[in-house]
Each structure stands twice: as structure tokens, then as C-alpha cells.
Amino acid sequence: MRILRFRQGPGAEPAWGWLEDDRVGGLEGSPFTTYRRLEATIPLESVQLAAPVVPSKIVCVGRNYAAHAAEHNAEVPKLPLLFLKAPSAIIAMGETILLPAQSHQVEHEAELAVVIGRRGRWITPEAAREHILGYTAVNDVTARDLQNSDGQWSRSKSFDTFCPLGPWIETDLDPAEILVKCLVNGQLRQMASTRDMIFPVPQLVAFISSAMTLEPGDLILTGTPAGVSQLASGDEVTVDVEGVGQLRNPVGADRRTG
């Protein structure tokens, strides 16, 4: 099932829904507790998609594809390399990625994102699926020059708009072998299968939950394939996750000064 958050009309608060073909139905309740599906009668093109989840934290995994580590002349980690991305960076399908004045090298990173559905600590790999609601597409936008100069990655990963997410959550997906792609202006930049991950999803859930409690709605960003490249104002970047769908966002300059 595909779960989403959507708005009907300007200024409306996002509501939970589900998607059947190209029609949306409401959800009574929450996908993290109990809910009832209402009939899918609303045309998808008539609603505005919101980010499909509002997490308490975004836990990211660095260098989880060997080819991506190699393109940055970095070693493959012996254990999952974790960092956090600010939830305030999240934007929805169609919203603009803003290039901050502080950076001259902003790059795309197409990834599969795991959405946690049930609270847990010390989750075993075998029990990981019981704690996962589903999967979505994400773009871990990165100010590469700031990442390299800062050493710590928080600033380079957490500018507002640096976490496009969506378009929805797919609950019926096996993450073991799916294609993750990124296209910029229709040209393929990244493509790899999740079978190439160094640490697969169940192992990531187990490792992360050995350090911190995972809450319903939390996100795990599973790493990006090789092929990251610089974005420019006027670009359109598309993250395509097999079995989930396409997440498309335009790119523009951030001219705000305060």
C-alpha cells in the first residue's frame, strides 16, 4: 500500500491518505497506530503532496556503496558510518532545493529511505521488518565543499530544503534488490542496486537501534550510489526508486539574507 500526506486547497493542513492507481483516499487515524481506509475517490492531480512523514530524527549512513566511497577516495567503513540530518531540511515533491550562498558545490545524493513504524531499541536484524512501516525516496542534498572543510557533516547536510522526501511511503517492498537512480534534467547521473549496499537494511536497523531508540516516523537514509554531481540553479533533479516512484524537485538560488 502507498501511504501519503496531502493537502486539499491553499493553507490546508496535511492529512493522511492512501493511493490506489491515480486516486487518493483518506485515512481515519494514523498509520503508526490504527487506521481505517476511506474510499479512494480524489484525483491525485487535484491534491498537493506533502512530505510523507515528519520524523523526530533523520539517521543517515555514509559510504554504504563501495563505488561512492571510491569516488571520494575514502575507505569503506568496517561498521556503518552514521550521521544526523536536521528534520527542518525536509521538503516535499515539487518544492525547490535552494542553493545557499555559503556553498559553491551542492550535490545530489539519491537514496532509499526507511520509515520506522514501531518504536524499538536493540532490534535484531531478524526483527527489523516488524519495526518498518515502509520505504520512500530521498535526496540527501549535500554542500560538498562545506562537508570537506568542516570535518563534521551537520552543516553541509542540514540546510533548509536539503532533504527532498517522497512522494509517498510504499509499505509492500523488499529492499534487498531494487534500483536507485538519479537524473538531472533527464540525464542519468546515478544508478545502482541496493544489493550493492555494504550494510543491508536489517543490519542498519539493528546497528542504529543499538545506539538510540528508533521512534515511529523516524527515517534511515541508507546511503547513495556513485555518480554524485553538482547542481545548478534551473536544474530539475529526479530520484527514482524502483517500486516506490519518482521524487522530482527543481533547483534554485537562495537569495534570502535573513
Image (cartoon, rainbow, N blue to C red):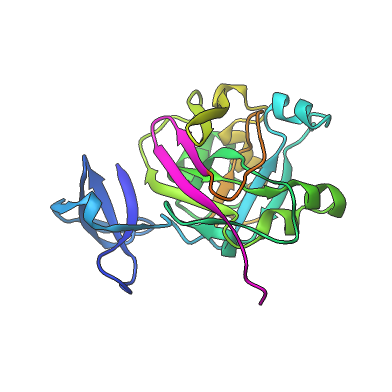
Report whether residue 116 is seen.
no
Whether the magenta-drawn stretch holds residue 82 is answered as: no
65 shown above or below 25 = above
Q: Residue at x 30, y 71 (%)?
A: 10
Looking at the image, is 128 positioned above or below residue 234? Answer: above
Whole-percent x and y of residue 175?
48, 30
Residue at the location (41% across, 39% down)? Answer: 246
Residue placed furthest toward the bottom: 258
Percent from the top left, x then y, of residue 240? 46, 34
Q: Position of residue 168 (x, y in %)?
A: 38, 47
Q: Is residue 254 magenta?
A: yes
Say which of 245 and 234 sits in front.
234
Task: Tell me if 112 is positioned left or right of 73 in this view.
Answer: left
Question: What's the magenta bit mostly, secondary-structure-wise?
Answer: strand
Residue 68 appears in the picture as rendered = yes
Left/right placement of residue 27 relative to residue 231 reads: left
Q: What residue is rendered at 76% in x and 30% in y?
A: 69
Camera-nearest residue between 49 and 131: 49
Quadrant where the C terminus is found in the figure:
bottom right
Residue 80, compared with residue 27, is above or below; it is: above
Position of the N terminus by quadrant: top left
Find residue 86 and report its horizontal and vertical position in percent: 63, 61
Residue 248 drawn above or below residue 99: above
Is 97 displayed left or right of 85 in the figure? left
Q: Which residues are magenta?
A: 236-258
Q: Nearer the viewer, residue 156 or 250?
A: 250
